[in-house]
Image (cartoon, grey):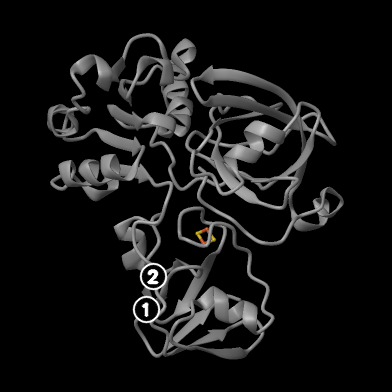
Amino acid sequence: MDACTIAAPVAASAAAATGLVRARLIAIRYAAEGIHLYEFAAADGPALPPFSAGAHVDLHLPNGLVRQYSLCNPQHETARYVVGIKRDPASRGGSSYVHDQLKVGTLVSLGAPRNHFALHEQARHTVLIAGGIGVTPIACMAQRLRALGASFELHYSVRRREEAAFLDVLAGPGLHLHVDAEQGGAPLPLRELVARAPQEAHLYCCGPAPMLDAFEAACAGRPAGHVHLERFAAATPSAAEGGFTVQLARSGRSVFVPQGATILDTLRGQGVAVQASCEQGICGSCETRVLAGTPDHRDSLLSDEEKRANQVMMVCCSGSKDPVLVLDL
Ligand code: FES
């Protein structure tokens, strides 16, 4: 992912105090045109925190930016994290910095792995759909399913063959590579392959926004709990209507969220420390428990069921449907 920024740099020496892990970049490898693999190992011990397929980490870059990247190595590996990063022509200092400046041996801080795109390992059949660099979490999932001996199919779409990464680990039964340029420019026939999937299948998609929108539309008739996607950028504008009060249960404080501000903006303005990273509802770092009230969910992470449950919310982008919202802060 290359869509998220926070302003404050995080010094390596502060890592332990902030729950971050110090890690050293130990290898950079070419994966495909414009895509490099970056391999990190713990700087202060033999192992990194465990993760599961679909997880991502915050990478705190030496230039002060923080970016989220999916882990793409097998989840049983605890000695290393591997992330695949594509140079984004419109990079705001994340992927371009990584490609141009990050050298083997560099120390960075990593956040603990978070997973809002978790694999349902017990599914009778799994359909994985990846577009472009969206293959990074999907590659980890495919390796996990193969290790489990589970039934799955992987549809990986790239514009040109040179842009296809991970073919060395993905090759084998179940892989269907779709190269647009070799199909007369035709995109992946998403609707057809979703329609072909057994009704009990779990389906996962990660890729550019038009692909995700098409995937959601194609899956409209399927059980919501069987449809999973991960976005690189917000699908819905943040709630900035304001006009409600947030009560902070732990401190007993109340803050009024004015029009034009998010909850996160307002809390920061009042000196309340809240963890946040992407600030657009796609990373999960600002997830906060809701104790009372009805959030106006605007994130791209929670499922419809989770949103209806109103037990947690992303305070960076979501607002309130009630005059008062009580949060576990
Ligand atoms: Fe990323 Fe809120 S800061 S979801």
Task: Judge by depth and name the residue closer to the eye, 39 or 96.
Answer: 96
Report x, y in % for residue 40: 71, 30
Left or right, 259 with reference to 202: right
Query: Picture quarter containing residue 118?
Result: top left
- Residue 115 x %, y %: 51, 45
Residue at coordinates 64% horizontally, 50% vertically from top-left?
Answer: 66
- Front in this rendered view, residue 320 or 262: 262
Q: Quadrant of residue 103?
A: top right
- In the image, which disc is placed on residue 294? 1
Secondary element type, mark 2: loop
| Residue 310, numbered label | 2
Residue 238 seen in the figure: yes
Question: Considering depth in this image, is 252 or 231 the residue closer to the camera?
Answer: 231
Kind of residue sitting beneath label 1: Thr
Answer above or below: position of 134 versus 311: above
Which mark is on residue 321?
A: none
**Mark 2 vs 1: CB contact within 8 A:** yes
Q: Residue at x 51, y 53 (%)?
A: 283
x and y, in percent, of residue 134 in the image: 41, 34
Q: Residues within 10 Å of mark 1 (few under 14, many from 20)?
A: many
